[in-house]
Amino acid sequence: MASTTSETVYNCCVIGTGKEGSAITRKLTEHGCKVCTAHSKSAEGTEHAAKHTGATPVSFDDPQCKEADIIFLTIPEKAVSELPKGLLQRSPSDVIVVDCCNYFPSRDGHIDEIDRGMPESIWVKNQIGRPVIKAFNAVLAGVLENGGRPKGSDSRIAIPISGDDAVAKEKIAKLISGMGFDPFDAGDLENSWRLQPGSPIYCTNLTTKQMEKAIRRANKEAMPTLRDQAYEKMCNADTKMDSQSLVQMLRETFADASKQISLEELIGTSQQQEIKTS
Ligand SMILES: NC(=O)c1ccc[n+]([C@@H]2O[C@H](COP(=O)([O-])OP(=O)(O)OC[C@H]3O[C@@H](n4cnc5c(N)ncnc54)[C@H](OP(=O)(O)O)[C@@H]3O)[C@@H](O)[C@H]2O)c1
């Protein structure tokens, strides 16, 4: 699925080796990027993940990590504040840091500033002391790995990007397109709350056209409750939910159950559609 040009091939470092980190690492490797995967906790975990994704396992002190063009954060939100102090300030000033994290207080514990309304990525930016681009947080790992489509295809899923640096956003947009998805410019970081869990565009596999409408209907006040409801449904499911049932549950929770947008409006009547994940 990757469509690669030398213009979009980068040295990347992925911090976090779980589902999201592994999916991003695989896609970047497939795309032709040189990827290292770094982990603050256990070298064994990093080595295991690297073996399955084609990345090189490194420590945070490794030059490959320090000199990466793009660093992806794929760890639980709260863990961002537990990264080694000054870690991301050692990188060159033009490195792009992509925040792929999400805040689920039931999973991560509470973060007061976010609970009081600070957009998650602004909190991340403050923690690491440098600007971030928010991207890849609103697409499930399984969809990222298997849901890419050629450019121009009707069912091509859009991936939203927020940030204040137009050049950095453009680079991430090209990467996303090369991975088989439509990049969707969701505005600046102050508005990145529209990409957070609870929003109708959060992991609901929308096309660009659908996303244009749905993003305007995100309701900041309603979102934390909807986020918590979705997390509870996921935890209480009888069997582990696959990407398809997760997308369906998120669509129903963030659309139908809310005052934001109806499910019909979200995906269209003709598209009580199969959910494209493979
Ligand atoms: N899964 C998805 O579909 C998806 C999609 C979009 C965004 N995200 C977001 O991506 C992030 C990771 O999700 P995930 O599903 O990949 O979770 P996961 O499978 O549980 O993996 C979490 C990763 O973070 C590491 N980690 C945990 N605490 C850490 C700490 N204090 N310092 C450094 N590393 C730490 C874990 O290391 P250990 O294994 O050693 O604990 C693991 O490598 C979350 O914020 C999530 O919301 C996930």
Image (spheres, rainbow, N blue to C red):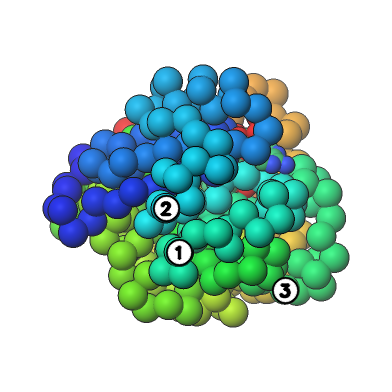
Please report contact status of discs 1 and 2: CB closer than 8 Å, yes or no: yes
Query: Which residue shows up at 69% across the image and 49% down it?
Result: 83
The image shows residue 17 at horizontal and vertical percentages of 54, 34
The image shows residue 220 at horizontal and vertical percentages of 68, 73
Query: Which residue shows up at 48% across the image and 51% down it?
Result: 66
Q: Earlier in the sequence, mark 1 or mark 3?
A: 1
Q: What secondary structure is marked by label 1?
A: loop
User: Residue beneath label 2, please?
Assistant: 67
- In the picture shown, does residue 117 fall above or below 65? below
Q: Earlier in the sequence, mark 1 or mark 2?
A: 2
User: Residue beneath label 3, please?
Assistant: 118
Q: In the shown orientation, is residue 197 left or right of residue 56?
A: right
Q: In the shown orientation, is residue 28 left or right of residue 178?
A: right
- In the picture shown, does residue 238 fall above or below 24? above
- State the residue in front, 83 or 152: 83
Query: Which residue shows up at 73% across the image and 34% down it?
Result: 235
- State the residue in front, 12 or 278: 12
User: Residue beneath label 1, please?
Assistant: 92
The image shows residue 124 at horizontal and vertical percentages of 65, 63
Q: Earlier in the sequence, mark 2 or mark 3?
A: 2
Closest to the camera, between mark 1 and mark 3, is 1
Q: Quadrant of residue 26?
A: top left
Q: What secondary structure is marked by label 2?
A: loop
Type of residue at label 2?
Answer: Glu
